[in-house]
Amino acid sequence: MFNSFTEIWLISLILLTSILVLIVTMQLSSALKKLTLDPNKQEEEASLSWWQKFTGLKPLEKEKDLEMEHQYDGIVELDNPTPPWFMYLFYITILFAVVYLFYYHVAQDGNIQEAEYKTEVAVAEKAREEYMKKFANSVNEDNVKALSSAKDLTEGSSIYTTNCVACHGDKGQGGVGPNLTDVYWIHGGTIKDLFQTITNGVPEKGMIAWNKTLNPIQIQQVSSYILTLQGTNPPGAKEPQGTEQK
């Protein structure tokens, strides 16, 4: 909020300064012309309206004086200089560019797109963490339900790959830990059983408690994903252990 207010104030200041520079430049240009123009030209300039002076437009009856010597196929080129309004705009862009360069890239006080993106990502991540803390604790072994949405199962698969593959295999076929793809379970195979086992662990068998690493929603997601491995019969599956879950 502070950076946005500062930027708005800075842009407003630049615009006001640019307008002031434009007015001063026009006044100086007008004064310089009065000093350098011959009397006839001064009278001609005095007869022009402020709009004609600003745009650099010449009356149609003066076009003959502006014709250049060369012509082609009856087409005559006029010796019209760049309109003053265009030059003033050009000067303003130069001034703006100098201030912008100093503020954003030299002093690095400005909130450029990359910094703004990182700030927004950090804010969003903090909001996400607060959301997870608020709602994750509402899930427990008494009310946990198997999730079926693609997003939750994808998250569960990612959690499994990161934390469970070393003991249970990349396809749930088992290894140090038991096979998760058959119907035999040592500590129960319902969603509530899995949630409780993953949360509290089985220390005597080397299964750590994951409640200090994963929040309840993440445990629910990985438990739901493990249930989808049922009946996949991966190659090299470990022999059945425990009791058949019907």
Image (cartoon, helix red, strand yellow):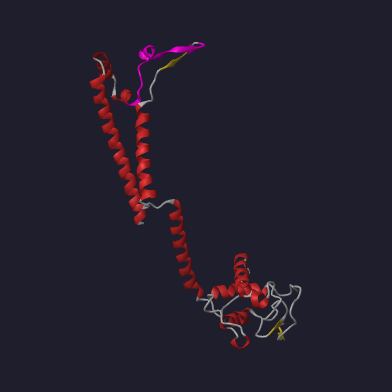
66 vs 48, nearest the viewer: 66
Q: In this view, does 73 lie above or below 139?
A: above
55 in the magenta segment: yes
Specify the segment rendered in magenta: 54-73
Horizontal and vertical percent for residue 5?
Answer: 34, 52
Q: Name the quarter where the N terminus is drawn.
A: bottom left
Report whether 75 appears left or right of 4.
right
Please tell me which residue is depicted at 45% across the width and 51% down the height of the picture: 113
- Number of numbered tags placed on the structure image: 0
Q: Name the quarter where the C terminus is drawn.
A: bottom right
Q: In this view, does 213 lie above or below 5?
A: below
Q: In this view, does 154 lie above or below 182?
A: above
Please tell me which residue is depicted at 49% across the width and 70% down the height of the picture: 132
Please tell me which residue is depicted at 66% across the width and 84% down the height of the picture: 188
Horizontal and vertical percent for residue 243?
Answer: 71, 86
149 vs 60, nearest the viewer: 60
Horizontal and vertical percent for residue 93?
Answer: 37, 37
Q: In this view, does 83 lie above or below 189?
A: above
Report whether 20 appears left or right of 166.
left
Horizontal and vertical percent for residue 100?
Answer: 37, 45
